[in-house]
Image (cartoon, rainbow, N blue to C red):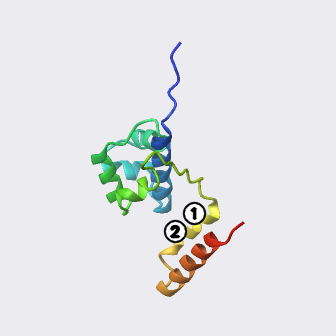
Amino acid sequence: MKKKHTPNTVDAIVGRRVRQRRLALQLSQEDFGKQIGVTFQQVQKYELGKNRIAVSRLIAISEALACEPNDLLDGLHNGQIIDVDALSDDAMKFARRFDELPDALQLVVVATLRAAEAVPE
């Protein structure tokens, strides 16, 4: 009997972040795959954490997603894994529109979110 492969937690988190960013940019797996030089099937494997992403490919991915490689790796160092749940539909819509907000409003939103983090539950 063949043992079923369970994705490494870090690979799954990075894959999920790649998928979230790709969807926020409204890129299909096929178009994204062409940009980074792989098939859409390979993109699926990356996004599910089934295949690990090599550093050279991570750089190509971050360039295609207009982000820094660290944006995809943030919180995964020193054995400290922070798993961000998949964004809700409303959060995805907000993320897509955030850059369209005037700079002053962006600052207000960010300050509000930081203040909310400081409030004890």
Which quadrant would the C terminus be assigned to in this image?
bottom right
Using the rendered image of the protein, determine whether residue 37 is visible from the camera's viewpoint: no
Q: Residue at x 51, y 16 (%)?
A: 2
> What is the number of callouts on the image?
2
Q: Would you call the spot at circle 1 few (<14 residues within 10 Å), some (14-19), or many (20 or more)?
A: some
Q: Which mark is residue 29?
A: none
Q: Residue at x 46, y 46 (%)?
A: 15
4 over 29 or under it: above or below? above
Q: Would you call the spot at circle 2 few (<14 residues within 10 Å), some (14-19), or many (20 or more)?
A: some
- Report the residue that reaches farthest toward the top: 1
Amino acid at circle 2? Arg
Q: Nearer the viewer, residue 27 or 96?
A: 96
Q: Is residue 19 left or right of residue 90?
A: left
Amino acid at circle 1? Met
Q: Nearer the viewer, residue 85 or 101?
A: 85
- Report the residue that reaches farthest toward the left: 56
- Report the residue that reaches farthest toward the bottom: 104
Q: Quadrant of residue 45?
A: top left
Q: Nearer the viewer, residue 61 or 10?
A: 10
Q: Quadrant of residue 92?
A: bottom right
Using the rendered image of the protein, determine whether residue 74 is visible from the camera's viewpoint: yes
Mark 1 vs 2: CB contact within 8 A: yes
- Could you tell me residue 61's position as x and y percent? 35, 53
Instruction: Residue under label 1, please give it.
Output: 92
Q: Residue at x 30, y 46 (%)?
A: 55
- Could you tell me residue 73's position as x and y percent? 42, 53
Instruction: Residue under label 2, please give it.
Output: 96
For label 1, the SS is helix
For label 2, the SS is helix
Q: Nearer the viewer, residue 103 or 115?
A: 115
